[in-house]
Image: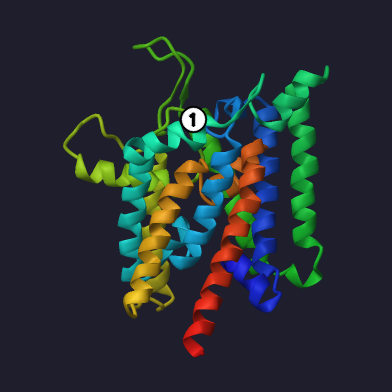
Amino acid sequence: MGAVSDILVMSDYTRMRQWSLAIGVAIIGVAVLASQGYIDTSKSIYTSNRFLYLSTIIGSLCFGFGMVLASGCGSKTLVRIGGGNLKSVVVFFVLGLVSYMTLKGFLAVLRVNTIDALFLPLSTTQDLPSILAAQTSIAKTHLQLILGLLIGGAFILFALLKKSFWQLSNLVAGAGVGLAIIAIWWVSGYLGFVAEDPKTLEEVFLVTNSGRMESLSFVAPYAYTLDWLILFSDTSKVLTLGIVAVGGMIIGAFLSAMLTKTFRWETFHGVEDTGNHLLGAALMGFGGVTALGCTIGQGLSGVSTLALSAFLALPGFIGGACLGLWYLQWRLERQLN
């Protein structure tokens, strides 16, 4: 949201270049891991053989619009909680509740029977290396590396094209986030992977809620965190990467705020502010699940697998954020007039 608002309000592309650098690093890192056989992107949650184009478009637009109303996306909400923002605590619970409803509740039934019913069936998984490998004689592992270097390199080139961007803080921010995405893919897809579970004799990913390979995302893990907290005494409820990442973001943000002396309590400024945050949280909860991820989940983790849905979701997040910012500007102009 910050990257989009910087561009619209100040024509400043710095944070967008940070995001682009993170995407490029993540794509290249995943390509190297996959080409060397450490992980298999076709087993991730983003690369099914059903291209849910309508769900992706609607979900990403809803999420993009919602994150503007709620003052930030799912990851930003956790950072703000750690910094003492009580509004973000409310956003956390509403987002988690609505995402759970969209995963397994009555919104899930509506989603599955309406927008999810419209999709393009593919003969392979929807990641670009698998699609091109099926059309050519080139091995998927080779295509994974070639496409990863080309596409990832293009994102990095865009980030580094402006000489003023070459500052340590920008490079660390972009590359650091990209490396975090790669690290979690390695943990879930390699370290936490068992080729043959002794109980079922099937392959299993031990540290994810979906049972498939995952990296960072901050919508469905909200729901699983609430589920773990509420049903803590149920021994079948275990800590997963998503749940631990939610807690880790809050703790890390709190420590950072205390060390930099920026921690301060903040709450709602009125009825409209409260309403915006409630609606924004609900839209993010619904949109993030429907689009199979948030700006981190699809915008970084999904894109790093070169999945078609991720490249459709990315402009959807940006478009939704633009609509949200224009809406807030329109509301402000009406109040001033």
Quadrant of the image occupied by residue 242: top left
Judge by depth and name the residue closer to the eye, 30 or 312.
312
Q: Which residue is mark 1?
A: 191
Q: As displayed, is residue 3 above or below residue 157?
A: below
- Quadrant hosting residue 26: top right
Vertical position of residue 268 compared to residue 111: above or below: below
Is 170 situated above or below 209? below
Q: Residue furthest bottom?
A: 337
Which x, y percent locates residue 280? 42, 61
The count of marks equals 1
Label 1 element class: helix
- Determine if residue 154 is in view: yes
151 sits to left or right of 327: right
- Horizontal placement of 73 versus 254: left or right? right
Q: Residue extending furthest top?
A: 201
Q: Amino acid at mark 1?
A: Leu
Q: Residue at x 77, y 73 (%)?
A: 164
Q: Position of residue 234 (x, y in %)?
A: 19, 33
Is residue 78 visible in the rendered image? The answer is no
Q: Between 228 and 193, which is closer to the camera in this rendering? A: 228
Depth check, front residue: 289 or 78: 289
Q: Position of residue 143 (x, y in %)?
A: 77, 28
The residue depicted at 74 percent of the width and 69 percent of the height is 165
- Apparent side of residue 211 relative to residue 152 in the rendered image (left or right): left
Tell me residue 312's x, y (percent): 65, 44
- At 40% from the left edge and 71% from the top edge, which residue is drawn? 257
Label 1 packing within 10 angstroms: few (<14), some (14-19), many (20+): some
